[in-house]
């Protein structure tokens, strides 16, 4: 398993979000990160459009040195609305954003 630093992954995420802003007319996009249980770490985006906020992320495994390796390439979407269920198993960001917007 190849581990990358948190900074490398965040840099890659930052470099790739501009096309999604334009294509899906997303009003605001930023980096999402959350530390989970059992050495899990989640990185992705927080997006906003039409008053709705979503957290779109991938799961990572964290090693002792703090390096991160993707667990799988399936994106998960969480809404800020507690009544909405999480959406899972998206293969790519175009699939995510076409479903949301």
Image: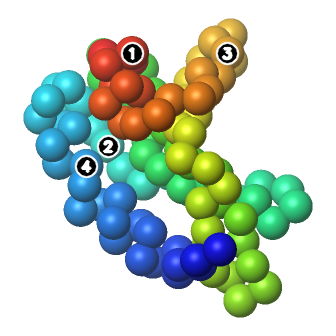
What residue sits right under mark 1 in the picture?
99
**Circle 1 sits in a helix, a strand or a loop, which is it?**
helix
**Tag 1 and tag 3, C-beta contact below 8 Å:** no
Earlier along the polypeptide chain: callout 1 or callout 2?
Answer: 2
Picture quadrant where residue 51 is located: top left
Outermost residue, top side: 83
Mark 3 Cα within 10 Å, few/some/many (few <14, many 20+)? few
Measure the alpha-carbon separation of dots 4 and 3.
24 Å
Earlier along the polypeptide chain: callout 4 or callout 2?
Answer: 4
Measure the alpha-carbon separation of dots 3 and 2.
21 Å
Measure the alpha-carbon separation of dots 1 and 3.
14 Å
What residue sits right under mark 3 in the picture?
85
What residue sits right under mark 2 in the picture?
29
Earlier along the polypeptide chain: callout 4 or callout 3?
Answer: 4
Outermost residue, right side: 38
**Number of the front mark, 3 or 2:** 3
Identify which residue, 17 or 71, lies in the foreground: 71
Picture quadrant where residue 40 is located: bottom right
**Circle 4 sits in a helix, a strand or a loop, which is it?**
loop
For image coordinates 42% across by 77% down, the residue present is 8
What residue sits right under mark 4 in the picture?
17
Earlier along the polypeptide chain: callout 1 or callout 4?
Answer: 4
Earlier along the polypeptide chain: callout 3 or callout 2?
Answer: 2
User: In the drawing, does residue 33 fall left or right of residue 39?
Assistant: left
Measure the alpha-carbon separation of dots 1 and 2.
16 Å
**Number of the front mark, 4 or 2:** 4
Measure the alpha-carbon separation of dots 4 and 2.
8 Å
For image coordinates 39% across by 15% down, the residue present is 99
């Amino acid at each position: 398993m190849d581990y990358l630093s948190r900074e490398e992954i965040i840099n890659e995420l930052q470099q790739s979000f501009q096309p999604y802003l334009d294509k899906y007319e997303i009003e605001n996009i930023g980096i999402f990160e959350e530390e989970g249980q059992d050495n899990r770490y989640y990185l992705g985006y927080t997006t906003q459009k039409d008053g709705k906020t979503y957290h779109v992320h991938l799961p990572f495994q964290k090693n002792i040195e703090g390096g991160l390796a993707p667990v799988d390439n399936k994106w998960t979407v969480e809404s800020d609305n507690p009544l909405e269920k999480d959406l899972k198993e998206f293969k790519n960001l175009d699939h995510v954003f076409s479903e949301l917007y």
